[in-house]
Structure formats: C-alpha cells, structure tokens
Amino acid sequence: MTRARSFWAWGWADRFPDEDARRALAANMSALFGREPELLPLPSIDAVVLPPPRIAPELACCTSDREARILHTHGKGYPDIVRAFRLDFTRAPDVVALPANEAEVEAVLAWCTARNVAAIPYGGGTSVVGGVECDVGAAYAGTCVIDLAAMNRVLEVDHMSRAARIQAGAFGPQIEEQLASHGLTLRHFPQSFEHSTLGGWIATRAGGHFATLYTHIDDLVESVRMVTGAGVMQTRRLPASGAGPCPERLVLGSEGALGIITEAWMRVQARPKWRASASVHFEHFAQAVECARKIAQSGLYPANCRVLDAREALLNRVSFDGTSVLVVAFESADHPLEAWMSRALAIASDAHGTCPKGPRFSSDGGKIANADAAASWRQAFLDAPYLQSALISMGVVVDTFETACTWDRFDALYAEIAAAATDAMTRACGVPGSLSCRVTHVYPDGPAPYFTFVAPGRGGGADVIEQWLTIKRAVSDAISRANGTITHHHAVGRLHRPWYEGEASPLFLRAFEAVKSALDPPGIMNPGVLLPPPGSGAAAGGPGRAT
C-alpha cells in the first residue's frame, strides 16, 4: 500500500499523533504554561476549496488535478502549516508539472515562458522559509509548480573516484537505498531527509546531520546540471579547480531563481563499519559550548558534536537532571575509533564534563547498542516536525530558527536572541514562553546555534500567524544586530529575504540580479526568492531589515 503524505501537516499522515497523544501533549503544555490549549478539530481534505486555475495545462506532463494542486500549495513553515490547517489554499498553483526527463523539464520552462507563467521548483516541498509558495505578485498569468519526483535514479557510479551521478528528484531514502547496493553512502542526512530531494538540498545549501567537516551539501557536489531559460548549464567533474569563480557555487543556494537542477555528480563514501558514541554532561551550558569549540579546533572532526542546553536535553529525553549535554560521535569505514574518542573525552574532562555511562563502540557496521542519549536525541530529532504540527493543531505558537557566528561573538549573540525572544513572546502571547537552544554544527571558527520557541497562542489561536510573525521578526532582527547570519541551513526563500538583503553586499545583489537576467531572461523562475519579484517596486540591495 502506498503511504499517504499529509495534505496539511509535516510528513506522513499516519505519523501524526492520535487523539490520546494530542491530549497528553496538551497536558504537558498546561504544566509548562499554566493553561491547557484546546484540541482543535483536524481538517479534512474534502473540505478544501480551491480557486479555479487561471490557465490550462497544455503539456502531457502537466495537470490541474485537485489533489495535485492541494499537495503542492504549501511548504512546511509555521505559517504554511497554519494556513493549511485552516483550509486556506488560496495560493494553490494553477498547474503542477511532473516531468519524467530533462527534455520535459525544458518543455515546461518553454511553455511557462510562452504563457508568462511563474515556474516554482518544488523539491520535496519541505521549505520552511516560503521557498515553494506561489506568492509571485500580479505580473504573471499563472503559476506552475515543477515536481521532479519521477526523476529519482542513481544513473551512474564511479567507484574509483567515489562519485555518483544522481537525478535531482531523488528523495533521501531513495538515494541511500540505491547507493547501498554499491557499498556506498552520500552521508547527507538533514532532518527532512525522508521527505526532501537532492535538487532541493543543492538549491538551498542544505545542512546535514553531521556536525563537523562535511556539514553542508556544498561539500559533496562534484558537478551539477541545471536547465535554465537560456539553455542547459553543465559544470565539469573535477576534484578542485582554480580556474576562475566556481560555477557550482553559482548553482548552490540559487533556490530555483536561476533554473531547475536536474542532476549532479556527488561525492560519496564507503559505508561506515566502525562507530563510537558518548554523552558528556555539564553543569552549565557555557561549559558544554566551550568544550565543543575545543573539539572543533582539535582536528578530530567527529561525525556528531552537538550541544543541548538543559531545556533542550529535557525536551529530547536525553537528560532529566538539569545538565547540558554534549553528544559526540565518530564513524569510519577504515579504522577503529577508540583513540579519537579517548582524545575527545579527555578534552571534555578538562572542560569539566562527565561521561557517566562511558563511550560505546560498534565494529560491525550497525547501530551502537544501548547508546541511550544519542538514540533518544536522534529519535526526538526526527519526531520534532510531527510534534510541531500537533502543537499547531492546538493553537500553540512554536517554531525553530538557526544562525551561525564566530566563536568570539557567540555569548553576545545568545544574550541578544534570548532577550529578544522572551520580550517578543511576552508581547505577542502574554507570557515569556519557552526558549531552548542546541548547537547543531561546529566549525573551527564558530558554531551554528539552533533555537526553539514555544508559547501559547492568544485569542483562541485566531491570530497566531501575527503572533508568530512578531516573534520571528524580533529574533531575526536580533541575529542581524549581533552579526549572525539569517540562516545557517534553512535557506532564504521569501521569508528571510529582508534580512538577507541587509546581510549581503548591495553590489553582490546587483551582480546576482544580472546573472538572473542572463539565465532567466523572462524572469519566470521562482519570483520573489532571493530577489524582489517583478513589479514589487523594491530594488535588489535595497533596505534589508523588516520591522
């Protein structure tokens, strides 16, 4: 039986918490905020009312089928899920394209150009920043969402160079399943792994599960192929080059504004045989962060080096004693890991950390037995988006945001964000709410902190998007003031564009606008992402900060 994706919430429909789980979750919210949120009735896809399509599909690979339009309307950001929960599908695409090959992709873009239709690459639809919204302004005759799910194969494997040519519509599990038969892995596991695609990862510079060294998809791209309005752009397979600006970097992070990625040669690795894991407890969050810095600068390059503050450790069922926790792990296809783990734990001990259960090891390619904290964190990590959807069904304001900064700025950035979030939740929701932090990735020169905020929606949930927006603007302004980046791995989309414009050089934005004009002459590719949409009156490199 084919598994059904939820039309409004995150992920699989059968993974959404049942009524008993929702009631238990509501009771937990009562303990946290002093009042229990109301369990709102769940929506039905049969009740969705769509606007009539403004244009008719004229290609065999295109459709205006009702369910296809519903399933391609929203991403998975907080406002997306709230609108879908409320059965607001006013931004449904007019047409959904499902090309089976690159020739059909080219035909779809040619049709969009001829009909003045905005083309929105969809990936897996997991954008949390408005990257797949059909919010393109009034300059277009309609909108066409382009879904490459039928282009999902590993086409070629170069064992000698350890690279694989993979179609952009392949989802994470499809990639790993096909590479496993060759004894290989791409080793890129974002939280959205099950529901996102290679093309989406490349277009958004996605960050994976691994906390050091190869943290972003950027590090794994050998060459890339993209269909644009001006033709097909294919970069050469090379391990490295000094020949001018890197063309792959033009495609990475382009978010569908320049064209549609159809395939890429990706650097792959042998599947790991040896694994090691340990959980180190610290009395203070600052101690755990300092330990992560020292490990990041040691050259050990653990696969995982993740810090959870006391509240985050509690939420993720990792620690219940008020300590902050550093989860550190190593993996290798080549050698045992005792020496690496021993050195990491020595660094942790010097930083006043304790590892009460000691390290755990595996040498058979399987998971580590009884790796309690790491296993608990991993499962909570995968469950978190389902939990957010359940809380949204109770009118709760809940979301995450992330950034990165240099180590010398972290304390000031953390303080700025904590103050801004607490104040904004109080103003928007009437209570200080809950703010937790984990450090998801560490580099020799800085960390990537990832925050979660939760607050009870006011007014029966009627205006929770405005309440969320008050908090989102406040924390984004705080990040900007503290010289962090508006996103470490969630992309820019339409949501982050005001702060991105304040972060990027105005001259660079004008140069990027010129590149878009060269590759997308009719201006149909994902209008409003990275650059203002035509007719908006905003100029690239204009005032950046939303207030």
Image: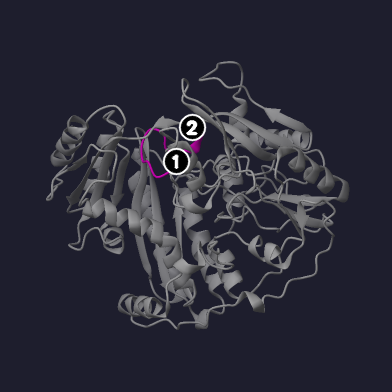
Please give the range of residues in magenta.
207-220
Q: Residue at x 37, y 47 (%)?
A: 440
Q: How many marks?
A: 2
- Cα separation, mark 1 vs mark 2, equals 9 Å
Relative to residue 232, is residue 498 drawn left or right?
A: left
Q: Residue at x 34, y 48 (%)?
A: 439
- Give how far across and how far down residue 390 sits, in percent: 45, 71
- Give how far across and how far down residue 10 sits, in percent: 51, 63
Q: What type is the residue that disc 2 sits on?
A: Leu
Q: What type is the residue that disc 1 sits on?
A: His
Query: How many residues crowd mark 1 within 10 Å: few (<14), some (14–19), many (20+)?
Result: many
Q: Residue at x 29, y 28 (%)?
A: 299
| 87 or 500, nearer to the observer | 87
Task: Give the SS element for disc 1.
Answer: loop
Residue 223 to residue 471: above or below:
above
Q: In terms of sequence position, does the residue under pointer 1 or pointer 2 come before the other?
A: 1
Residue 443 to residue 382: above or below:
above
Relative to residue 517, is residue 211 drawn left or right?
A: left
Give the residue at mark 1: 188
Residue 134 to residue 205: above or below:
below
Magenta region, main secondary structure: loop
Whether pointer 1 and pointer 2 mark residues with C-beta atoms closer than 8 Å, the reply is yes
Give the residue at mark 2: 220
Q: Residue at x 45, y 61 (%)?
A: 385
Image quadrant in which you'd find residue 362:
top left
- Give how far across and how far down residue 407 sits, in percent: 34, 39
Residue 210 to residue 73: above or below:
above
